[in-house]
Image (cartoon, grey):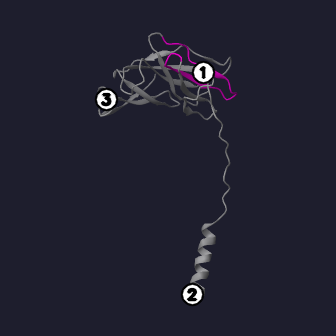
Amino acid sequence: MNYIRHSILLSLLSLCCIHYSIAQYSLEEFRVHSNTDVRLLDINDQGMICGYYYQPTNSYEKGFIVTPGGKFITLPAIAGFNHTRVVSINDNDTPALLIKASNSVGLSEPATVYKSYYFPVGDSISALVAVNLSPNNPNPTKINNKNYMAGWYAQGPGVAQPRYFWMYFDS
């Protein structure tokens, strides 16, 4: 009886242990101007990466993208704002960038959302266009392939404030 029980158990275990190929990946350190405080926030299907890095010389955050070919492109300065973050990038032929600009790094601080485009021919970024949103402290999180944008905002300063979802349908 034990022999039959062990045989059944071994058979079940062998069925469960079907060989799967496991992909192997390598991780590489990503630095910007020898700065290790770099935040990679999104990657699209073309292999473009976006995010921001912290500039210790003036305590500002600076948004950037990295092209599939490895070219590093920093956002142009936005008048009136010290901090910029490229928070999302979509998969269109001319990828759209979703950008947050603010004067402080808090999550519920006044901010403005911008949109821009990356032009693969010429490796350049279009002029930044402000997105008119009603909350004065939007935190954008994603832009999809129809250029619809989504994010959240808080009703006031502080971590304990309720958070609300927002969507913007670009025409």
Q: Which residues are magenta?
A: 57-78
Query: Can you give x and y, in whole percent of width and height, for residue 70 in the image?
Result: 68, 27
* Image side of residue 95 versus residue 168, left or right: right
Picture coordinates of residue 100 (x, y %)?
46, 22
Extreme-top residue of the structure = 79
Task: Label 1, secondary structure: give it.
Answer: strand
Residue type for callout 1: Tyr
Q: Nearer the viewer, mark 3 or mark 2?
A: 3
Q: Residues within 10 Å of mark 2 (few under 14, many from 20)?
A: few
Residue 12 counted in the magenta span: no
Verify CB contact (< 8 Å) between mark 3 and mark 2.
Answer: no
Give the residue drawn at x 68%, y 55%: 21
**Mark 1 or 3 closer to N-term?**
1
C-alpha separation, residue under disc 1 versus residue under disc 2: 68 Å
- Viewer-side residue, 161 vs 115: 161
User: Helix or strand or loop: what does disc 2 sit on?
Assistant: helix
Q: Give the quadrant of residue 150.
A: top left
- Residue 94 at least partly seen: no
Q: According to the image, label 2 marks what residue?
A: 2
Instruction: Name the outermost residue toward the right.
Output: 69
Q: Which residue carries the number 3 mark?
A: 158
Of the residues tagged 1 and 2, which is closer to the observer?
Answer: 2
- SS under mark 3: loop
Which of disc 2 and disc 3 is earlier in sequence?
2
Three-letter amino acid code of the residue under disc 2: Asn
Could you tell whether 34 is left or right of 160 in the image?
Answer: right
Q: Amino acid at mark 3?
A: Gly
Give the residue number, with chain letter if any, for mark 1: 118
Determine crowd level at label 1: few under 14, some 14-19, many 20+ residues with C-alpha closer than 10 A.
many
Nearer to us: label 1 or label 3? 3
Look at the image and tell me in which quarter the N terminus lies: bottom right
In this view, which residue lies farthest toward the front?
A: 57
